[in-house]
Image (cartoon, rainbow, N blue to C red):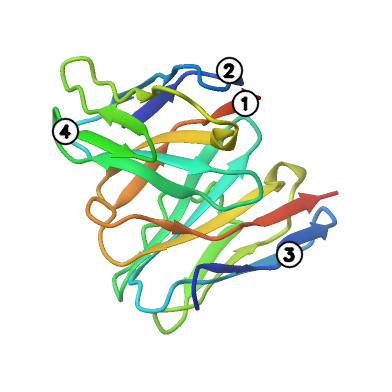
């Protein structure tokens, strides 16, 4: 069945470091791909999305490109901040459902 | 309301008891979802309501779990004869339309602890 696999955390980086969180997917057809983020004490919220191959989603300095050839949707940010500390979930849609990965916890040290 | 509201925020119960968890979606949102978030397991889909259509119950883990949505708005997730493995955060989410085009708005969840 459709699934999402993302790198296990926690990931710990220093402020201003470059971030990559890997995400690969298995799906029939061409799903939309998403990154959701859960900040401490807050509910999950959509960070960015891409709906077709080669689309790039971007928000708050984060980017991810829908790569059909490698079935990947890696999340990147050029310079992370302490406020980016959160749990990040890669996800895809199957029919009208969102299938989530297990999440990657990110810690940014000042 | 301004967002998806869930109650209670925390629930502690004894093994074998029944529990009810409530979700108030954003007004006007036709789609409503329940997910379960367990430590190290990510978000597990439970059930999906879309308008007046029959719900997609394919994610419910056992027949002890059920959910209803009254009047196309408020939803209640019921767990009968709770077990310790039911301990998790139960998240509700709603969206304006299909999730391919519209984003999900999540509530803050209900932390369920079964002793």
Q: Which residue is mark 2?
A: A13
Instruction: Please tell me which residue is depicted at 39% across the width and 22% down the height of the picture.
Output: A78
Q: Nearer the viewer, residue B46 or B17?
A: B46
Looking at this view, is A44 or A93 the one in front? A44
Q: Nearer the viewer, mark 2 or mark 3?
A: 2
Residue position for label 4? A55
Dot 4 crowding, Cα within 10 Å, few <14, some 14–19, many 20+: some
User: Seen in the image, is B51 located left or right of residue A36?
Assistant: left
Specify whether residue A1 is in view.
Answer: no
Name the spot of residue B57 as percent of width and height, x first: 42, 56
Relative vertical location of residue A38 with respect to residue B99 in this rendering, above or below: above
User: Quadrant of residue B10 in the image?
Assistant: bottom right
Q: Residue at label 1?
A: A107
Q: CA distance from mark 2 to mark 1?
A: 6 Å
Same chain shared by disc 3 and disc 4:
no
**Image quadrant assignment for residue B49:** bottom left
The label number, if any, that marks residue B18 in the structure image: 3
- Looking at marks 4 and 1 on the same chain, the residue that comes earlier in the sequence is marked by 4
Chain to which mark 1 belongs? A
Q: Earlier in the sequence, mark 4 or mark 2?
A: 2
**Chain of the residue where label 4 is placed in the rendered structure:** A
Q: CA distance from mark 4 to mark 2?
A: 27 Å
In the picture, measured across the screen, residue A88 lies left or right of residue A29, that is right
Q: x%, y% of residue B74?
A: 50, 77
* Secondary element at tag 1: strand
How packed is label 1: few (under 14 Cα within 10 Å), some, or many (20 or more)? many
């Amino acid at each position: 069945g459709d699934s999402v696999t993302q790198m296990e955390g926690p990931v710990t980086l220093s402020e201003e470091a470059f971030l990559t969180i890997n995400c690969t997917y298995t799906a029939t057809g061409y799903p939309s791909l998403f990154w959701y983020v859960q900040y401490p004490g807050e509910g999950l919220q959509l960070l960015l999305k891409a709906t077709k191959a080669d689309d790039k989603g971007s928000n708050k300095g984060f980017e991810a490109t829908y790569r059909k050839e490698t079935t990947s949707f890696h999340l990147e940010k050029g310079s992370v901040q302490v406020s980016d500390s959160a749990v990040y979930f890669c996800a895809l849609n199957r029919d009208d459902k969102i299938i989530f990965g297990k999440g990657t916890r990110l810690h940014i040290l000042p | 309301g301004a967002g998806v509201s869930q109650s209670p925020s925390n629930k502690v119960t004894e093994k074998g008891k029944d529990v009810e968890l409530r979700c108030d979606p954003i007004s006007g949102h036709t789609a409503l979802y329940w997910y379960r978030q367990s430590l190290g397991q990510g978000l597990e889909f439970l059930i999906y309501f879309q308008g007046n259509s029959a719900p997609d119950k394919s994610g419910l883990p056992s027949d002890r779990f059920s959910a209803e949505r009254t009047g196309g708005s408020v939803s209640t997730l019921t767990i009968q004869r709770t077990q310790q493995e039911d301990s998790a955060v139960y998240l509700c989410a709603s969206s304006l339309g299909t999730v391919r085009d519209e984003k999900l708005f999540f509530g803050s969840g209900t932390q369920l602890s079964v002793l």
